Image (cartoon, rainbow, N blue to C red):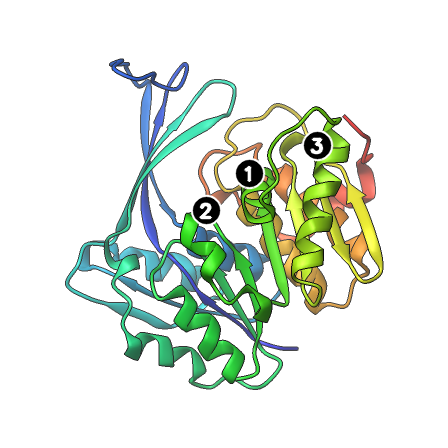
Amino acid sequence: MPTIYNAGSLNIDDVFQVASIARRGETISSRALDRFAGGKGLNQSIALARAGVRIRHIGRIGEDGVFLRDVLAADGVDISGVEIGKLPTGHAIIQVADDGENAIILYSGANRNWSKKDVQRIKHGTRPGDILLLQNEINMMPELIEAAHEAKLRIVLNPAPMEPEVKNYPLEYLSWLVVNEIEGRELAEIDIDEQGVGETEERVISELHRRYPKTVIVMTLGKRGAIRVDDDGLIRSFFPDVGPIVDTTGAGDSFIGYLLAGEIFGLSGVEGLRRACAAGALSVTRKGAAISMPRRTEVDALLRDAAFNKP
């Protein structure tokens, strides 16, 4: 089994429970405040570990975030690549509304303090065919992609948060690109038009596949599930009904962890996409991000019992 090296963010998440997301200029009260381990990188490492994959996290924290190493280690993540520096740990302020939707303010902190030396750390111990997983919450992204390509690693990118410079990354080196609808439209340079929703989705993912023909493209569609395209064609999966939505924070990270685990375990595209959708669906039934990542046994049980129906 290949090892996944996740060069990813580590954050402290302060989550405020509110009736509805604050509007511009508005002051609102929060009914509760919880502190969680978070960051897209950390969330995805935990999702991968719980899916049964060998995962090493590479990242940067401040002294205030040492407990994040313990959180990762408790789930079996190799934390030898997590270094402590002088800058504060990344921090997120998250509003979670009663309908489960969220709004996030992110301070990058140590996550945006990667150096050229840190980039070279991804090569330590890797073998050709191992996998480098990236999100867009750290700096030195083009350099990381280039270094991983030189080391003959397979590269996965989840370009969140989506920023204009992503288009200038060496995306042709990617083995997998996982985007949501907004990220997909921006990368494909396709605006919302008068076509039906399904037609627009397929236009976007097909254009991405045309631009990056050697890359497996996966696009998440919120409550409508996800679609995937590669040389074998386009497939689609829906989310199973698992009950009321509690918190959507981290749903995409759960999806990505189980999607990539499916690839490593040799599942078909259809099976892997269904499994990723099941994991994403389970995560939204719980508060928090990292702690909401489901375990493999839970996903197995849901796949046995749930119906994947079009909403």
Report the residue marked by disc 1.
Answer: 182
**Front residue of this view, candidates 307 and 198:** 198
Distance, label 2 to label 3, CA atoms, is 21 Å
Say which label, 2 or 1, has the lower sequence index: 2
Report the residue marked by disc 2.
Answer: 162
Q: Is residue 310 left or right of residue 249?
A: right
Q: What amino acid is labelled 3 in the image?
A: Arg
Name the mark on residue 283. Answer: none
Quadrant of image for the N terminus: bottom right
- Residue 234 screen position, x and y as percent: 81, 50
* Quarter where residue 131 is shown: bottom right
Q: Residue at x 52, y 65 (%)?
A: 133
Q: Is residue 47 above or below residue 26?
A: below
Q: Are marks 2 and 1 in contact (CB under 8 Å)?
A: yes
Residue lying furthest left? 86
Report the residue marked by disc 3.
Answer: 224
* Quarter where residue 174 is shown: bottom right
Q: Secondary structure at mark 3?
A: helix
Q: Is residue 256 above or below residue 128?
A: above
Q: What amino acid is labelled 2 in the image?
A: Met
